[in-house]
Amino acid sequence: MVNKIKLARIEKGLTQAQLAKRVNATRQTIGLIEKGEYNPSLNLCIAIAKELEKTLNDLFWEES
Amino acid sequence: MVNKIKLARIEKGLTQAQLAKRVNATRQTIGLIEKGEYNPSLNLCIAIAKELEKTLNDLFWEES
DNA sequence: AATATATGTAATATATATTTAACATAATGT
DNA sequence: ACATTATGTTAAATATATATTACATATATT
């Protein structure tokens, strides 16, 4: 399963480092979130979503 | 502005303590989230949304 | 071959979310 | 009046998200 965040980031033509800078995070944090090994804060999720022109549901929600 | 989470919780007929228990959090944490003074973790947001039968966007997303 | 870029990963430090415990108040029921 | 329930709030302790620094690798470019 390829990550939705990674896909959205690549669609926007951004590197991990570029996205990190725009959301005031580090490259490492972005990498871990994309790996799905993280439990990021709501504010960071919102910042990422806005930067990638997606919503929270688009990137972080899965119907079960 | 009354909180969307508080509204959804009351609609479900739950107290802060009851919701807290169901999402493995404390009453205080729920209270602070409802006050909007908190930056909760994504996992907690997801747990709250599922328990209240809402989505992340319903409770935590605002168009700007 | 050498350099630059993008990403993976690990150790330690720091900031902050969350818990625990406690006390306060308002509302309700007996 | 008394007890109970729901919520507000605060202080200190604990867990964990995030930053910082560093090194490694793979790929592309010159």
Image (spheres, coloured by chain):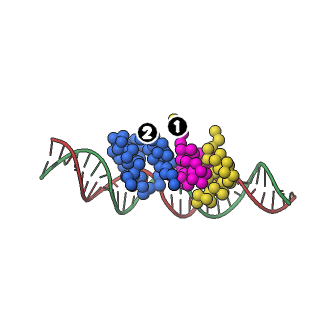
Chain colours: A blue, B yellow, C green, D red
Q: Disc 2 designates what residue?
A: A53
- Side of B43 where A52 appears, left or right: left
Report in which chain the residue with disc 1 lies: B
What residue would you read off at disc 1? B63
Q: Going 52% across and 37% down the picture, which residue do you hit?
A: B63
Depth order, front residue of D28/C3: D28
What amino acid is labelled 1 in the image? Glu
Proximity of marks 1 and 2: CB atoms separated by less than 8 Å: no
At numbered mark 2, what does the secondary structure look like: helix, strand or loop?
loop
Residue D29 quadrant: top left
Residue type at mark 2 is Glu
Provide residue A34's location: percent of width, then percent of height.
39, 52
In the figure, is residue A15 to the left or right of A44? left
* Residue A51 picture location, percent across and down: 42, 40
The residue stretch that appears in magenta:
B34-62
Q: Quadrant of residue C19?
A: bottom right
Tag count: 2
Q: Is residue B2 left or right of residue A8?
A: right
Image x and y of residue A32, in percent? 39, 54
Chain ID for label 2?
Answer: A
Is residue B48 highlighted in magenta? yes
Residue A26 appears in the figure: no
In the image as oriented, which residue stretches furthest toward the front? A64
**Residue A12, horizontal then vertical, whole percent:** 36, 40
Residue appearing at x 65%, y 50% in the figure: B9
Few, some or many residues within 10 Å of mark 2 (<14, 14–19, 20+): few
The residue sitting at 58% across, 58% down in the picture is B23
Q: Residue at x 37, y 46 (%)?
A: A7
| Residue nearer the viewer, B34 or D15 | B34
Q: Is residue B58 magenta?
A: yes
Report, in whole angstroms, how far the alpha carbon at label 1 lies from the one at label 2. Answer: 11 Å
